[in-house]
Image: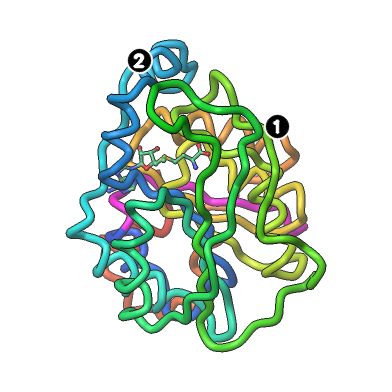
């Protein structure tokens, strides 16, 4: 059965450091980047108050200064000839793109997620977000007829900044084969994992927030996924440190 998953509760970079090199087929992630704080101040507080999963709190931000160590690890854990997708806004795109390239990736383009309706706040009101598309080595997309604008309504009253599974499904179907391993080091409510289960892929997710793990686990089980606490040990050598073992077996 391919629909297996493993969840962990660590800092994203620590977690990635415990994974074997070239052991992952696809990374799809949505880091809590610094400029989210700016969006939060411009009108998302009401939605956060209503969030089921957030306990009325915003999550921790991952500082831009930590991007180089993050991208270095994402590059290392990915198999050769694979893809990396990262959700972000325009401000973070300008900052992150050269750093992801410096880690060794080829940048292809930003894919636009068109959320159909405008968001809350003021100024030119937000209707889109980017998904940056990077490549390690060379991997052809599975369907060359998919446009670079993906239209899907945003998720209302979900986990803060929850992404629609329909978007993650497109990315997973484009860049993996059934049975392959997809990971998300900042998984939140587990949208990437949910989509992976629906597509018959394996999933390993991580988040520092306990509540996120609870929400994601319930979602993945409901979708028919089976938790497997040894999933990430594929390809591991025996000389694991106790810290690595704890990271890989999750909590
Ligand atoms: C933007 S949200 C992800 C939302 C997710 N895409 C979804 O659909 O629900 C970012 C997540 O990163 C987590 N986070 C913050 N700092 C982290 C860190 N250093 N390592 C791992 N996760 C972290 C937060 O708890 C939050 O759940």
Who's the residue at 33% across and 54% down the image?
92
What residue is at 70 percent from the left and 81 percent from the top? 140
Residue 108 horizontal side relative to residue 165, left or right: left
Give the x, y percent position of residue 224: 75, 40
Q: Cβ–Cβ below 8 Å for labels 2 and 1?
A: no
Residue drawn at x 54%, y 24% as measured from the top left:
158
Q: Residue 114 vs residue 184: left or right?
A: right
Magenta span: 1-12
Q: Is residue 73 magenta?
A: no
Q: Nearer the viewer, residue 158 or 21?
A: 158
- Measured in 3D between alpha carbons, the distance from the residue under mark 2 to the one under mark 1, in whole angstroms, is 24 Å
Which residue of the protein is positioned furthest toward the left in this rendering? Answer: 65
Q: Nearer the viewer, residue 184 or 6?
A: 184
Eyeballing the image, is 129 above or below 79? above
Q: Quadrant of ligand 1?
A: top left
- Residue identified by numbered label 1: 222
What is the quadrant of the C terminus in the image? top left
Q: In terms of secondary structure, where does tag 1 sit?
A: helix
Relative to 50, say whether 113 is above or below.
below
Q: Residues within 10 Å of mark 1 (few under 14, many from 20)?
A: few
> Is the C-beta of the residue carrying label 1 under 8 Å from the nearest atom of ligand 1?
no
Q: Which residue is mark 2?
A: 56
Q: Residue furthest front?
A: 123
11 in magenta: yes
Q: Residue at x 48, y 76 (%)?
A: 107
């Amino acid at each position: 059965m391919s629909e297996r998953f493993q969840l962990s509760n660590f800092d994203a970079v620590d977690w990635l450091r415990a994974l074997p090199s070239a052991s992952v087929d696809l990374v799809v992630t949505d880091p809590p980047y610094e400029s989210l704080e700016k969006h939060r101040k411009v009108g998302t507080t009401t939605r956060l108050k209503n969030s089921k999963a957030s306990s009325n709190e915003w999550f921790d931000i991952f500082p831009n200064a930590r991007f180089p160590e993050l991208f270095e690890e994402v590059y290392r854990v990915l198999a050769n000839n694979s893809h990396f997708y990262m959700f972000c806004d325009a401000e973070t795109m300008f900052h992150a793109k050269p750093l992801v390239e410096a880690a060794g990736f080829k940048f292809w383009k930003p894919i636009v997620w068109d959320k159909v309706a405008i968001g809350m706040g003021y100024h030119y009101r937000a209707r889109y977000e980017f998904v940056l598309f990077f490549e390690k080595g060379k991997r052809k997309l599975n369907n060359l007829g998919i446009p670079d604008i993906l239209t899907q309504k945003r998720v209302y009253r979900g986990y803060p900044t929850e992404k629609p599974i329909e978007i993650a499904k497109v990315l997973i179907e484009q860049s993996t084969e059934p049975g392959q391993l997809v990971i998300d080091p900042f998984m939140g409510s587990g949208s990437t994992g949910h989509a992976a289960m629906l597509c018959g892929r394996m999933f390993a997710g991580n988040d520092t927030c306990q509540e996120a793990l609870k929400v994601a686990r319930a979602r993945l089980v409901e979708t028919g996924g089976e938790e497997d606490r040894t999933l990430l040990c594929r390809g591991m050598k025996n000389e694991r440190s106790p810290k690595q073992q704890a990271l890989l077996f999750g909590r």
